[in-house]
Image (tube, rainbow, N blue to C red):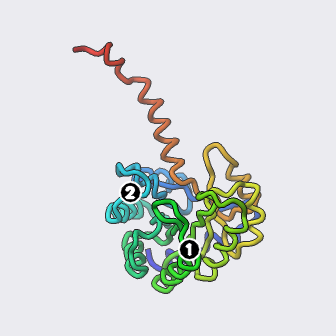
Amino acid sequence: MTVRGAAAFRALHHGRAPGDPLVLPGPWDAASARVLADAGFPALATPSAGVAAALGYADGRTPPDEMFAAVARIARAVDVPVSADVEGGYGLPPKELVERILEAGAVGCNLEDSAPDGTLTDPRRHADRLAEVRAAAGDALFVNARVDTYLRGVAGPGPALERAALYVAAGADCVYPIGAPPEHLPLLRAGIQGPLNAFAPADGASVAELGALGATRITFGPGLLRRTTAALADIAAEFAPAGREGRPG
């Protein structure tokens, strides 16, 4: 998509009534993307862990070329804007990273602030990288800055808010404090300038509850893939062959 596509995606995040978050389900391949788009969702957001699983990799282990190719297949399959989870950016220079995201057809991206080994990136260094991504992309890319403090065991909203302020100042369009407890969302909402992304776990607060607590947009990570594969396991159990001892020789 073009800058116009990014503008449409950006507009979906603004002017929303309290309690009416933008819900962005996460497709892992072209088929799941079509199902979600046909259901009426105005945009989609790929989860890196879900795409990795669909490609046969552990989360964080997908080769960049395969991740961008998967995003491209998803973006081609639907007529709604697609945001791509590109993890920490695969070590690519900002200009090349932006080019590859846009070439894949995505109009947004997630960029996380921790390394594959789980260590948090220095927030000022990460803010500098976000600023370089923004400079390279202009308005053609919606940047969702993931804040990994909760995920990495740094408790409380204070550290997340400190990072969020740096990332917004660097040009991030949205902040995603993944793993933040629902009861922290009002504090995060009050302290973050711009849209707030909340994660909706399968066994946690509902979309409506997260929206009421201040979330601007809701994503699910690989949750939809896991629910789908659990359903497939139930279906498979209906006609799965008997145990090895009961099979013909």
In this figure, which residue is indicated by the disc labeled 2? 61
87 vs 80, nearest the viewer: 87
| Spot occupied by residue 62 in the image (x, y as percentages of width and height) | 37, 58
Which residue is depicted at the point 57% across and 59% down?
24
Disc 1 + disc 2, Cβ < 8 Å: no
Q: Quadrant of residue 25?
A: bottom right
Q: Amino acid at mark 2?
A: Arg
Secondary structure beneath label 2 = loop
Label 1, residues with CA under 10 Å away: few <14, some 14-19, many ≥20: few
Mark with earlier residue (1, 2): 2
Looking at the rendered structure, which numbered label has been put on residue 122? 1
Query: 118 or 168: nearer the eye?
Result: 118
Label annotation for residue 13: none
Q: Nearer the viewer, mark 1 or mark 2?
A: 1
Q: Amino acid at mark 1?
A: Asp
Q: Against 178, is 89 above or below?
A: below
* The quarter of the displayed image where residue 244 is located: top left
Relative vertical location of residue 99 with respect to residue 117 in this rendering, above or below: below
**Is 154 rendered above or below residue 122?**
above
Q: Is residue 155 left or right of residue 135?
A: right
Locate the N terminus by quadrant: bottom left
Label 1, label 2: how many angstroms apart (C-alpha)?
A: 22 Å
